[in-house]
Image (cartoon, rainbow, N blue to C red):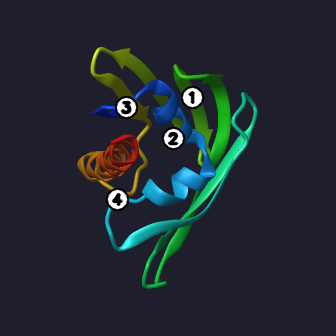
Amino acid sequence: MITVEASINAPIKKVWECWTNPEHITKWNNASDDWHTPYAENDLRTGGKFKSTMAAKDGTMSFDFEGEYTLVEKNKAIEYVMADGRKVEVSFEETPVGIYLIESFDPENVNSEEMQQLGWQAILDNFKKYVEALHA
């Protein structure tokens, strides 16, 4: 598995809300400024499904990121299987300075593992920036 992580200076309630609410997901779920997430839906429960559309802002490319939850422990952990069968684990650990978020995922076969790690880390860094700006 590939792992990305971030320390987020915000309370767990805010971090969880921003991670799971489609209204927030559409505002932070991109790896670079030339991409965005115009659509997101989320049925946050074990067995529930989620889907978000990631698209280039210039309209040249888009894809759906979707899957099904295998575990949802509010404010603690989320696990899911993506549509292509790869697994993802996300944990939210409370620390004295905020939340330590760890996300691990099975790599795909097209892009290098380094490129995948950089892309997922960029999205997580964008999430951190978004949450901390809301919390400030």
Identified by mark 4, the residue type is: Ala
Question: Relative to residue 32, is residue 28 depicted above or below?
Answer: above
Looking at the image, residue 2 lies above or below residue 126:
above
Residue indicated by mark 1 = 79
Is residue 43 rendered to the left or right of residue 108?
right
Which residue is pictured at 30% across the width and 32% down the height?
A: 9
User: How much space separates mark 4 and mark 2, taking CA atoms?
Assistant: 15 Å
Q: How many marks?
A: 4
Between discs 4 and 2, the one toward the N terminus: 2
Q: Earlier in the sequence, mark 1 or mark 2?
A: 2
* Amino acid type indicated by mark 2: Trp
Residue designated by label 4: 31
**Callout in the foreground (4, 2):** 2
Q: Nearer the viewer, mark 1 or mark 2?
A: 2
Place of residue 105 in the rendered image (x, y in percent of width and height, measured from the top left):
43, 36
Q: Are marks 2 and 3 in contact (CB under 8 Å)?
A: no
| Lower position in the chain sequence, tag 4 or tag 1 | 4
Front position in the image: 86 or 98? 98
Residue 75 in percent (x, y) is at 54, 22
Decide which of tag 2 and tag 3 comes sooner along the chain: 3
Query: What residue would you read off at disc 2?
Result: 19
Q: Position of residue 131 (x, y in %)?
A: 39, 43
The reply to whether dot 4 and dot 3 touch (C-beta < 8 Å) is no
62, 40: nearer the viewer: 40
Q: Depth-wise, is mark 1 or mark 3 nearer the camera? A: 3
Amino acid residing under circle 3: Ala
Callout 4: SS: loop
Q: State the CA–CA distance, disc 2 to disc 3.
A: 12 Å
Residue 83 in sight here: no
Badge 3 is on which residue? 10
Q: Residues within 10 Å of mark 3 (few under 14, many from 20)?
A: many
